[in-house]
């Protein structure tokens, strides 16, 4: 592991993930199924793509469509981030089941336009990114020519209106506190992504440290949580699900897979991670995802 600054949130998140160990339960263990149901639809795996953006620039031309096709072929959900409207349509045309996470555009009409498109395309879900607003100097971002603006507590009604703007499930991404989780829950969201944009905030709490606090909070009973940030393997996915995640998102490794081998690279990576998850389930006596429990997790290092 390379040397990084103490405040590097990605580095600290990775260290926390690696500090979590599992006990084994081999007696009476059986083969495991990673079958996954989300918003009424069945998938082969709870390991999904992160809501990536601008893969034409960061990976290869047609990278967003490669991500969609790769996820579909792996029986996984594709999450997608900032994209042209035509890109969203092209990804949907692959038949992939997509959750689109919309950036907090200063032009709020753009948010509603994208929610409307998501509904017309019958995406699996749609949502809003709440933590991708400020740059390293604390100024509101202008990302690829798109000014962004925060969602404030005085605009909680606005968040509720976004959630009600479509018949699709509505997700909030970037939750890393019980404070934000309760506000999102009160707005009527269908799920939350526990995550941080590592470079946006130094010393951010690792998502898996915060997750159990959300899962066990009395005012958040019944909420659905997903985890992003530094999830790279099936074992990472297992740890997240043991601590209460419904599913997980993998990002940067899939960008590398696209650069190297396009859609096939995505499919292969997701399938391999799913095999790793299945192995962890067998080794802890879990026949189904519902059997995975926090009882087997220990922080050791």
Image (tube, rainbow, N blue to C red):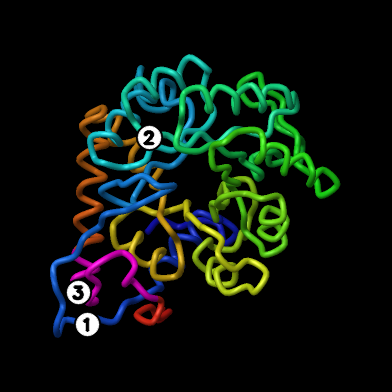
Q: Secondary structure at mark 3?
A: helix
Q: Kindly indicate the quadrant of the structure image that contains residue 124.
A: top left
Question: Marks 2 and 1: CB-CB under 8 Å?
Answer: no
Q: Secondary structure at mark 1?
A: loop
Residue 182, position as x, y percentages in the image: 70, 60
Question: Marks 3 and 1: CB-CB under 8 Å?
Answer: yes
| Residue displayed at 48% across by 30% down | 53
Query: Is residue 110 positioned above or below 131 on the image?
Result: above
Classify residue 206 as left or right of residue 148. Answer: left
Q: Which residues are magenta?
A: 279-293
- Give the position of the N terminus as an image quadrant: bottom left
Residue at which label 2 appears = 97
Residue 108, position as x, y percentages in the image: 74, 27
Residue at which label 3 appears = 283
The foreground one among 115 and 181 is: 115
Disc 3 crowd, CA 10 A, few/some/many (<14, 14-19, 20+) = some
Query: Is residue 187 positioned above or below 53 on the image?
Result: below
Classify residue 42 as left or right of residue 11. Answer: left
- Give the position of the C terminus as an image quadrant: bottom left
Q: Secondary structure at mark 2?
A: loop
Residue at which label 1 appears = 25
| Residue displayed at 25% across by 72% down | 286
| Residue displayed at 46% across by 22% down | 88
Choose the circle earlier in sequence order: 3 or 1.
1
Disc 2 crowd, CA 10 A, few/some/many (<14, 14-19, 20+) = many
């Amino acid at each position: 592991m390379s040397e990084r600054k103490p405040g590097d949130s990605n580095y600290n998140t990775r260290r926390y993930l690696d500090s979590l160990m599992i006990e084994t339960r081999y007696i009476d263990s059986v083969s495991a199924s990673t079958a996954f149901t989300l918003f009424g639809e069945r998938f082969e795996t709870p390991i999904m793509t992160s809501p990536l953006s601008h893969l034409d620039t960061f990976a290869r031309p047609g990278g967003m469509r490669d991500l969609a096709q790769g996820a579909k072929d792996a029986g996984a959900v594709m999450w997608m981030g900032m994209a042209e409207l035509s890109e969203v349509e092209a990804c949907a045309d692959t038949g992939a089941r997509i959750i689109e996470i919309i950036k907090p555009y200063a032009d709020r009409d753009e948010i509603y336009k994208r929610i409307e498109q998501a509904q017309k395309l019958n995406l699996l879900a749609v949502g809003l990114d709440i933590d991708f607003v400020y740059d390293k100097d604390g100024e509101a971002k202008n990302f690829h020519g798109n000014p962004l603006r925060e969602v404030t507590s005085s605009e909680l009604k606005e968040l509720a209106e976004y959630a009600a703007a479509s018949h699709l499930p509505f997700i909030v991404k970037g939750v890393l506190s019980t404070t934000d989780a309760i506000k999102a829950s009160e707005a009527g969201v269908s799920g939350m992504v526990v995550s941080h944009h590592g470079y946006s905030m130094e010393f951010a709490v690792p998502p898996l440290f915060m997750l159990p606090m959300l899962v066990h909070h009395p005012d958040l009973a019944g909420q659905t949580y997903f985890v992003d940030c530094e999830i790279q393997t099936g074992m990472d996915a297992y740890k997240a699900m043991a601590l209460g995640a419904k599913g997980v998102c993998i990002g940067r490794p899939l960008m590398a897979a696209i650069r190297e081998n396009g859609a096939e690279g995505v499919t292969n990576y997701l399938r391999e991670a799913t095999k790793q998850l299945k192995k962890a389930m067998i080794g802890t006596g879990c026949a189904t995802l519902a059997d995975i429990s926090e009882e087997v997790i220990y922080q050791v290092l």
